Structure formats: C-alpha cells, structure tokens
Amino acid sequence: MNKNTMFEIIQNDLTVLETELISVIHSQEDLITDIGGHLVKAGGKRLRPALYLVCARSRAAELKDILPMALAIEMIHMATLVHDDVIDDASTRRGRPTANACWGNYQSVLTGDYLFAKAFSVVAVHVDKAMLKVLTDVMCSMCEGEIIQDKDTFNPDQSEEQYLTRIAKKTADFIAASCELGGMAAGLPADDVAALRKYGYSIGMAFQRLPTIFLT
C-alpha cells in the first residue's frame, strides 16, 4: 500500500485541509502570509493530520467539527520544521529553499512562533481541555528531543536506549498524539484511544528508524 492509497478514505478531507491551510495562515502582516504560503506550497506527506483524520473518521463525524485540529496539527509540524531548518542552517527542504534561506533566521523563527500560536487559536473553541493537554504535552516532548539531540551531537558514547528516547520525543510522540487526538475526536472508549496512540507511536518509531535499519 503506497501513500496515495493508504489515505484514500480521507482524500476529500485532505483536499479541504490544503485549501484551509492557506486561508488560516493569512495574516495582516504580508510577510507572515508570504512565508506561510511558501511553507504550505512546499508540500509534504501531511502524515500527522492524515492519521488524525483517519482515526477521527472511525465514527461518523462532520468535517467542520474535526478539521480545526487537523489544521492545528499540521501548523505545529510546519512550525517545528521552520525552527529545525534554522537550527540546522538548512538551505533546502523537499527540494525547495527553506524559509530561513529566503527570509533569514529572525523572520523565520518569528513565523514559526506565529504558527504555534495560530494552531492553538484555531482549536481553542473547538476542543476540550484534555485534547489541549495532549497538544501541549507533545510540544514539550518535541522540544526536549531537540535539546537532547543538540546536547549529544558529538557524544560517541550514546546507548541505543538514549537514541530511542530521542527519536520518540522528536517524532513518534507527535504521530502517537495525532492518532490519540483522532480517537478522542471520534469519542472512542479510553481503551480504543490508547490503542490508537500505541499504533501511532509504533509508526513514528518505525518511520524514524528505517534509515538506520537499512544501513545496518
């Protein structure tokens, strides 16, 4: 199953997501709109919101009720990529110039911050406190993962356990949270929500480890 068929059930939802992303990142400050538009047009797998939507669609749901969280998830992901590119001094991503290569680090970091804030603004009136806590917790986890990675960049004595902890915080926890939030949006029982979180976590760990597995 390739990426074009695995999310076939939510293709219409993903089409709407793309349109709404352009709309929701609009700012009265043209530069923010320009940078945000550049980020959206750069594309990407949209894996996290797609998994969220699949899980949310496990029970009948109106797209208008579940779309705000999908938008927030993707905007948070976009924001982390902007900040990553600044930290890594990256000039390209997905074959396109990065925001920092086009507009500089200062404007890019602030736009990333804007996307974080906008994500929570979009969901503030649509979700309950439990879902907001999942989002805030996973943002803390991603920041911890980046700090751990930076701290251990030149440490040759890292254990496999340390490596797995780092990739869990940087990648797997967010994918797990996306599935968990989808289950919560669908109103599934707690056991089912926990199972979806475990499913997402497993995808995230495999996603991050594949290059290592193929090289060993």
Image (cartoon, helix red, strand yellow):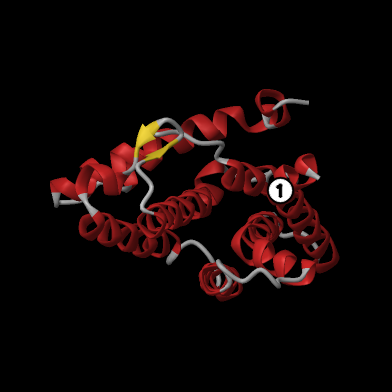
Say what amino acid the circle numbered 1 marks: Cys
Depicted 211 relative to depicted 197: above or below: above
Say whether residue 205 is left or right of residue 175: right
Q: Which residue is mark 1?
A: 55
The image quarter in which residue 8 lies: top right
Is the residue 120 above or below the residue 147 in the image?
Answer: above
Q: Identify the residue at image location x=25%, y=57%.
A: 105
SS for callout 1: helix
What residue sits 68% from the left and 58% below the top? 172
Left or right relative to 216: residue 163: left
Q: Residue at x 55, y 75 (%)?
A: 129
Q: Whole-percent x and y of residue 125?
A: 43, 65
Pointer 1: residues within 10 angstroms few (<14), some, or many (20+)? Answer: many
Tag count? 1
| Snapshot quadrant of residue 4 | top right
Residue at the spot 37% in from the left edge and 63% down from the top edge = 121
Q: Nearer the viewer, residue 62 or 21?
A: 21
Name which quarter of the figure residue 159 lies in. Answer: bottom right
The residue nearer to you, when weighing 84 against 154, is 154
Residue 73, image x and y in percent?
51, 54
Where residue 169 sits: x, y (%)?
A: 63, 67
Q: Is residue 150 left or right of residue 10?
A: left
Counting from the top left corner in percent of width and height, residue 88 is at: 41, 55
Q: Is residue 142 above or below residue 58?
A: below
Q: Nearer the viewer, residue 7 or 184?
A: 7
- Quadrant (top left, top right, bottom left, bottom right) of the C terminus: top right
Q: Quadrant of the N terminus?
A: top right
